[in-house]
């Protein structure tokens, strides 16, 4: 993702960054480094504050809407972790390609590489993807149940699942769960209590998304958007320049579109204090951020506000161990259950699609091809 910040990313006096040697990490400590901690460990003291408070802070807020002092570097940014583990240097490891996983191959992937896509969307928005999947599946006889939330899971004597749906139920040979880990933890039967305990600790944070459209306005810069460190604004995570990335989606009455994302410690404090999280509050904060950071001082012609409760899982310290514990429990007890979705190994749309693909392959007992 190409990002823009209206201030120098690193402001300091002195020489170029100096990597400093350190003893090899003790095996029991590997993978337990916080995002800020790993960066602080590898860069000279003169840069620790700048890097921690700007680069990693902004990145963790922009991607996870989280706190860089709480998130796990191994689980959130595995390429950075692998680069440090392999070459004892983040920069050197990235330059030498450490942490790069095998990439899938298809005609679409080859086209994206050839045309150097940095982001993608669909003509009618990303909702076209689930709509197309629904059409594809139902045309082949698959039943899609809507408006019937799962109330509980129980194991039958023959090893099948009974899925309770309130006033009805159904039986399943295998369940693929794509709901948040904490939600699944409340659905599992008593026999899976250890698994439920592990899943319950994978928490999530809320994010307010405010879409603004301005008539006759222009951005002072061009790019995908910019991220905001908590020291600059504790409530604003970042702003995406929608009209720059996808001008064809500006609609019949074109105008400058931006999306302001609100969350972080500010939203957590608002929730904890019992503050009324109204659309007016979020719109006010978004318009103020757009005015200060992008000079968009005129009122927007259109505004859409959505509060997504507990929408982004937090991969805190020890997250990979929770996943190992869950995987081991499922294998040991041979439960016909597969975990998928954003709670485990990636929160982006691409990650979730890949998670679903691998989950389907495992449920069918085949090895996912790359």
Image: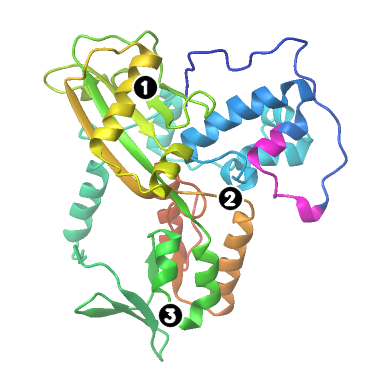
Marks 1/2: CA distance?
A: 28 Å
Magenta: predominant secondary structure element? helix
In this rendered view, identify the residue nearer to me: 335 or 360. 335
Q: Is residue 106 visible?
A: yes
Seen at 49% across and 47% down, the residue is 346
Q: Which mark is residue 324?
A: none
Asked if 216 appears above or below 74 in the picture, the reply is above
The percent coordinates of residue 220 (x first, y second) are 37, 8
Residue receiving disc 2: 316
Query: On the picture, is 100 further left or further right than 169?
Result: right
* For marks 1 and 2 on the same chain, the one whose residue lies earlier in the sequence: 1
Q: Quadrant of residue 288?
A: top left
Asked if 279 appears above or below 247 in the picture, the reply is below
Marks 3/1: CA distance?
A: 46 Å
Tell whether position 45 is magenta.
no
Query: On the picture, is 116 further left or further right than 281?
Result: right
* For marks 3 and 1 on the same chain, the one whose residue lies earlier in the sequence: 3
Asked whether the residues under the numbered discs 1 and 2 touch, taking CB atoms below 8 Å apart as contact, a structural biologist would say no
The percent coordinates of residue 21 (x first, y second) are 86, 31
Secondary structure of residue under mark 2: loop
Query: On the picture, is 354 further left or further right than 86?
Result: left
Query: Badge 1: how crowded within 10 Å, few (<14), some, or many (20+)?
Result: many
Which residues lie in the magenta part?
27-39
Coloring applied to the structure: rainbow
Secondary structure of residue under mark 1: helix
Secondary structure of residue under mark 3: loop
The percent coordinates of residue 82 (x first, y second) are 69, 41
Query: Badge 3: how crowded within 10 Å, few (<14), some, or many (20+)?
Result: some
Q: Which mark is residue 189?
A: 3
Query: Which residue is most to the left?
Result: 252
Residue receiving disc 1: 289
In this rendered view, identify the residue nearer to me: 91 or 269. 269
């Amino acid at each position: 993702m190409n990002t823009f910040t209206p201030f120098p990313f690193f402001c300091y006096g002195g020489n170029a960054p100096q990597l400093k040697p350190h003893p090899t990490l003790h095996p029991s400590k590997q993978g337990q480094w916080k995002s800020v901690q790993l960066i602080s460990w590898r860069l000279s003291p003169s840069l620790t504050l700048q890097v921690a408070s700007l680069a990693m802070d902004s990145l963790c807020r922009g991607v996870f809407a989280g706190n860089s002092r709480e998130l796990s570097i191994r689980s959130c940014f595995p390429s950075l972790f692998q680069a440090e583990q392999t070459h004892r240097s983040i920069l050197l490891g990235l330059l030498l390609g450490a942490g790069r996983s095998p990439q899938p191959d298809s005609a679409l992937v080859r086209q994206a590489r050839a045309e150097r896509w940095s982001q993608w969307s669909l003509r009618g928005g990303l909702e076209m993807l689930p709509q197309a999947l629904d059409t594809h599946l139902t045309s082949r006889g698959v039943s899609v149940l809507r408006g019937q939330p799962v109330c509980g899971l129980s194991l039958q004597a023959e090893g099948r699942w009974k899925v309770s749906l309130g006033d009805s139920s159904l039986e399943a040979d295998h369940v693929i769960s794509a709901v948040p880990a904490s939600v699944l933890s409340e659905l599992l039967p008593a026999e899976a209590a250890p698994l439920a305990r592990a899943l319950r600790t994978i928490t999530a944070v809320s994010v307010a998304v405010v879409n603004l459209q301005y008539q006759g306005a222009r951005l002072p810069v061009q790019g995908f958007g910019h991220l905001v460190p908590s020291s600059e604004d504790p409530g604003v995570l970042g702003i995406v320049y929608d009209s720059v990335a996808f001008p064809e989606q500006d609609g019949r009455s074109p105008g400058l579109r931006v999306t302001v994302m609100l969350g972080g410690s500010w939203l957590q404090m608002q929730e904890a204090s019992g503050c009324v999280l109204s659309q007016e509050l979020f719109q006010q904060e978004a318009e103020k951020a757009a005015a200060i950071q992008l000079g968009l001082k005129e009122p927007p012609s259109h505004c859409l506000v959505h509060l997504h409760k507990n929408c982004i899982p937090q991969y805190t310290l020890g997250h990979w161990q929770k996943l190992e514990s869950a995987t081991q429990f499922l294998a040991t007890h041979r439960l016909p259950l597969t975990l998928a979705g954003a709670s485990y190994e990636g929160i982006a749309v691409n990650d979730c699609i890949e998670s679903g693909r691998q989950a389907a392959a495992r449920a069918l007992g085949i090895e996912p091809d790359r």
